[in-house]
Image: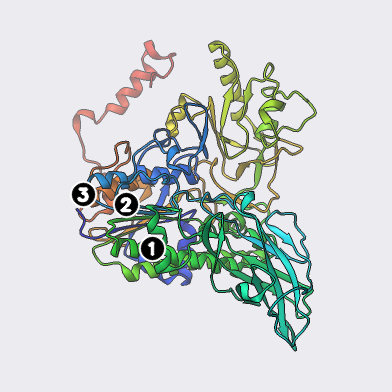
Amino acid sequence: MAKGKVYVMGIDQMVLPLTQHFIQEGSVPTLAKFFARSSSGQALANFPCWTPNNWATISTGAQSGTHGAQSWFIRMPDGQDVSSLTSLGINAETIWEAAERHGLRSAVLHYPGTMPSRLKNGYVIDGDGGVIYDACPFELAAAEAYTRERGIESPSLKEIVLKPAEGWKGLPSGGPTPLATSLPVRGKYPEWNTTWQAVLLGNAKGYDRVVICQERDLSTTLCECRLNEWSEWATVSLGGREGGFRFKLTTLSPDGKTIKLYRSQIMPYCGFSDPDEIGGELIRHIGPYQEYVSQMFNILGIIDFPTCVEEAEYQAQWFAKAALYLTQQKGCDIFFCHWHFLDDVNHFHLAHLDPTWIRYDPKDAEKHWDMVRQAYQVIDRMMATLLDGVTEDDYVVMVSDHGCSAINRKLSMELFLKERGFLVLKDPEETPTTFLNDWHNRIDWEKTKVWLHEGVFLDPFNLYINTKSPEEYKSIQRDLIRELRTLVDPKTNQTAVAMALSKQDAEMIGLWGDQVGDVVVVLETGYTLAKKAGGTVLEDNQGQVASGHGRIKPTSETRYGTEKAIFAIAGPGIKKGYARPVDKLGHIRLLDVTPTLCHLLGIQAPAQNQGLVLWDLIEGYEMVRERPNPTPEYGPTKHYKEWLQHFMYGFGLLKDETNPC
């Protein structure tokens, strides 16, 4: 077995082209050093190229059809839909389960599909690995913001009214008249909702700080913050549990007429890990845990991008420190984590870097370059903290679950099916979209041949045939595949669908089993499925989500974007500075991560593993073969091509026959 530890730092949506760009410009010095001593390359993700499917692939070494987590929700045998971000949706053994059979202890942090925990002697912290705002099952309250002028409708953005403070206790004398407001706090559940109080205070120059209290009394102060500064972490009780949060005052005019106040997510001090004690222990040694970081409030106009980066920085450093604590203080041999902020950044900014994008503006590009650069620099500093604490006997891995590329056009699958006569609604005038309330009840099931599940995140790339007749099933399937394969985008004069496969043929892209539709759709580079139907089947992507992944073919690449993931490993016996020659050996596959780590650990791979050991990354193994040049002469077959040509095309018996091979 390996002498040291194994650290797998999962960075959602990290891509090699941008990593190399930032290394070459000198803005990520730690990554430059790490990749120089690593074996690395792009890695092919399993289809569909998105979070639940490929983090499961990485941890199990199993194909999508085997681990079964290819969709965001999994339909169980009893008809229930369970999230594939829970372990209930992962129908394969993980590397940490396999390691436990060999007496090794693992720690898994914010990794999708790991809770409820299957470990008996390891640690799982926040094993949901959520990727969406307000979706963390462990949070006490999602982040919220407060402003006097709410320009965008959002339940997470609260409009407040500031009035001269009345009925307050302990207010200081001097300065402008204190202004006060109530701050409604939306808990995870309605019964947890509460209201805090805030007061603006200042000096002769005007208002300069906000104090947040539980009541109209400064003796109940929770925290205080000044312009462009974070408050100290505060503790509050919601739903019978204590949790931590902080505020940042991002805007405050001296006259108090303009204010923007942001509150971080409130995460509990217990109840988010297994065993429960480890979560509290990490908080005592590192600080409060923050599960979700995104640009949402930046897009809403409440905080600037550097504030997003500050939250991401805190979370990334927490992850690196937790990795070292769990391995060096708690005896863990293996550490896995999943850090999601880069995924959020790429969706909104990566396309703006790409000259092939439909809305590319070179004048605007530098702003987006800077935003993406800042996110990579957070990763750089996270890795610096980790690498400062590891030893020469340890293995360190950086891996992503997929990439991201510019989206030019969107396809309304619902409208396509309606126009081609496959899908019929009870109201023919209604615009078809799976986001309609009671979607299934709006379908005319007697006339409908093909249908989709409700909601894009449930089952967006599978199409289902509505018939019990085997003969009709085959006929509809053939017709549907033909229509999909011949769908030509009138704007680009290119097909929008890269592959339309029958359920039987989907095995060639790793899909089989009870979660696969009757027809599977893989989109071409630059396309995505529309959230809602527009006027035509194919339309330009005009949304803020400029880049995407998932339903696109896994080999897609643009100038700086790619659907391919990233993989790099450094440690004893690993080649330094090695990049697999793709033209000779093909790409690394995410399928191969777990069996390779198991080989290095000297343990048996998980029971459902279907990947291979990446031998060419290991010192002493050479996989590339070169053909001899010049070609050696071998007499018996020297004229074989000439003979074969004569027999196949010149000999009368086969002259007019179909080529048999």
Q: Which residue is mark 2?
A: 122
Q: Nearer the viewer, residue 564 or 296?
A: 296
Residue under the point 37% across and 52% down: 275
Q: Which residue is mark 1?
A: 281
Residue 567 position within the rendered picture, expressed as x and y whole percent measured from the top left: 39, 54
Residue 447, placed above or below residue 582:
above
Residue 398 visible in the current orientation: no
In this image, 186 relative to 643: left or right? right
| Quadrant position of the C terminus in the picture | top left
The label number, if any, that marks residue 602 in the structure image = 3
Q: Secondary structure at mark 3?
A: loop
Question: Is tag 1's residue or tag 2's residue first in the polypeptide sequence?
Answer: 2
Q: Nearer the viewer, residue 93 or 42?
A: 93
In this image, 422 relative to 165: left or right? left
- For badge 2, the amino acid type reads Gly
Which of labels 2 and 3 is toward the front?
Answer: 2
Residue 20 position within the rendered picture, expressed as x and y whole percent measured from the top left: 45, 62
Q: Residues within 10 Å of mark 1 (few under 14, many from 20)?
A: few
Question: Is tag 3's residue or tag 1's residue first in the polypeptide sequence?
Answer: 1
Residue 583 position within the rendered picture, expressed as x and y whole percent measured from the top left: 37, 47
Residue 44, placed above or below residue 498:
below
- For badge 3, the amino acid type reads Gly
Residue under the point 20% across and 59% down: 3
Residue under the point 56% across and 20% down: 478
Marks 2 and 3 close (CB-CB < 8 Å): no
Dividing the picture into quarters, in which one does residue 595 lie?
Answer: top left
Which of labels 3 and 1 is toward the front?
Answer: 1
- What is the CA distance from the residue labelled 2 to the residue labelled 3? 19 Å
